[in-house]
Image (cartoon, rainbow, N blue to C red):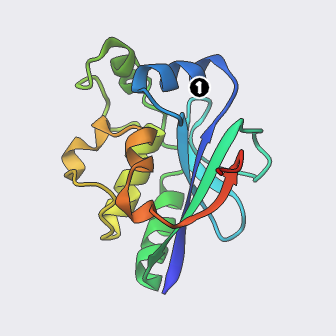
Amino acid sequence: MVLFRIRFITESDLISDAIRLVTFSEWSHVEIITDEGTYIGAHADGGIQERPADYCKPTRERRYAIPCTDAQLAAIMASARKDIGVPYDFLDIGGMFLHDRGLHSKSREICSEWVFQKVWDSGIMMLNCMRDFSHLITPEMLHLCPLLIGRCTYSFPEVT
């Protein structure tokens, strides 16, 4: 058994604040943690990218480790790296602000939809949601995943 690691963050900027406001969330971004200590996620400035550990200074952060098989982890990481370069789905973000979640592009991604899909494709069910509805998932929804209960490995600020 190995661990699939995931990170939820909030930054101090207008986009992060707007996403949190519209989604009633503590979190504005979710991404995959690699064994090399980098992060793979969907970003407005560049789409799906693998970024170094120090690429941002979050104001809030939580990391989780979910047990999985070697095959599941390998599938998640291979699929994640294959997606590097996929554009960001600004239409989906616009749909959040307009409360029209039907606005999204099937050839572009936002962070929460993308992470959910990578995990789903490996056979891990994070939420009671079919893959066809993944465009509705926000970082907050993923953060409420029952698989994360008791699996927090890092929290800033520290939760008391």
Q: Position of residue 148 (x, y in %)?
A: 45, 61
Disc 1 secondary structure class? helix
Q: Position of residue 149 (x, y in %)?
A: 45, 62
- Nearest the eye: 149 or 73: 149
Q: Quadrant of residue 119?
A: bottom left
Q: Position of residue 140 (x, y in %)?
A: 43, 40
Q: Is residue 45 left or right of residue 83?
A: right
Q: Residues within 10 Å of mark 1 (few under 14, many from 20)?
A: some
State the residue at coordinates (54%, 33%).
28
- Nearest the eye: 80 or 154: 154
Q: Residue furthest front?
A: 160
* Residue of label 1: 16
State the residue at coordinates (65%, 50%).
159
| Position above or below: 138 against 115 | above
State the residue at coordinates (37%, 43%).
141
Q: Is residue 28 left or right of residue 89?
A: right
Amino acid carrying mark 1 in the image: Ser
State the residue at coordinates (45%, 40%).
139
Q: Position of residue 145 (x, y in %)?
A: 37, 55
